[in-house]
Amino acid sequence: MELSDQARAICAKNYRGWQQKINGCGKCPIHAACTAQIHWSQKGLDESIAKVNEAAERLPHGAAECAAAQLDIFSDIA
């Protein structure tokens, strides 16, 4: 299982590096799902990814479109 395009776009919009002063993860709308405890197995990882994808899908429609548009900026890099 992989992160959805929507979840990746939300992450790209909010994550600005590993340094705490510039990192936007704390304000990210899917932060709670993304940082939840993961069980040490493939099944646990798949369940965690599914929860992050579900959290991204639950965002209001306008926020989801905005996040998906951010992915287009990085599409030539991927």
Image (spheres, rainbow, N blue to C red):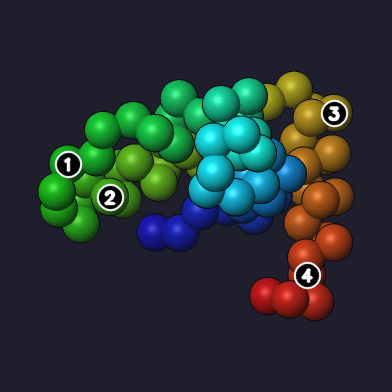
Image marks 4 and 1: residues in contact by CB distance under 8 Å: no
Residue 75 shows in this picture: yes
Residue beneath label 2, please? 45
Q: Which mark is residue 75?
A: 4
In the rendered structure, which disc, 1 or 3, sits on the residue that comes first in sequence?
1
**Is 64 located above or below residue 18 in the figure?**
above
Q: Secondary structure at mark 3?
A: helix
In the rendered structure, which disc, 2 or 1, sits on the residue that comes first in sequence?
1
Q: Secondary structure at mark 2?
A: helix
Distance from disc 2 to disc 1, alpha carbons, whole Å, reads 7 Å
Residue at the spot 51% in from the left edge and 53% down from the top edge: 3
Residue 18 lies left or right of residue 35; in this view the side is right
The residue type indicated by label 3 comes to: Gly
Q: Secondary structure at mark 4?
A: loop
Looking at the rendered image, the quarter that the N terminus falls into is: bottom left
Task: Give how far across and how far down residue 70 sits, in percent.
Answer: 81, 51
The residue type indicated by label 1 comes to: His
Distance from disc 2 to disc 3, alpha carbons, whole Å, reads 29 Å
Task: Give how far across and how far down residue 9 sits, in percent.
Answer: 69, 49
The residue type indicated by label 2 comes to: Leu
Image marks 2 and 3: residues in contact by CB distance under 8 Å: no
Task: Give how far across and how far down residue 38 sits, in percent.
Answer: 24, 40
Eye-nearest disc, 1 or 3? 1
Snapshot quadrant of residue 67: top right
Q: Which mark is residue 62?
A: 3
**Is 26 located above or below residue 66 in the figure?**
above
Residue 10 shows in this picture: no
In the rendered structure, which disc, 4 or 2, sits on the residue that comes first in sequence?
2
In the rendered structure, which disc, 4 or 1, sits on the residue that comes first in sequence?
1
Residue at the spot 78% in from the left edge and 70% down from the top edge: 75
The residue type indicated by label 4 comes to: Ser
Q: Which mark is residue 39?
A: 1
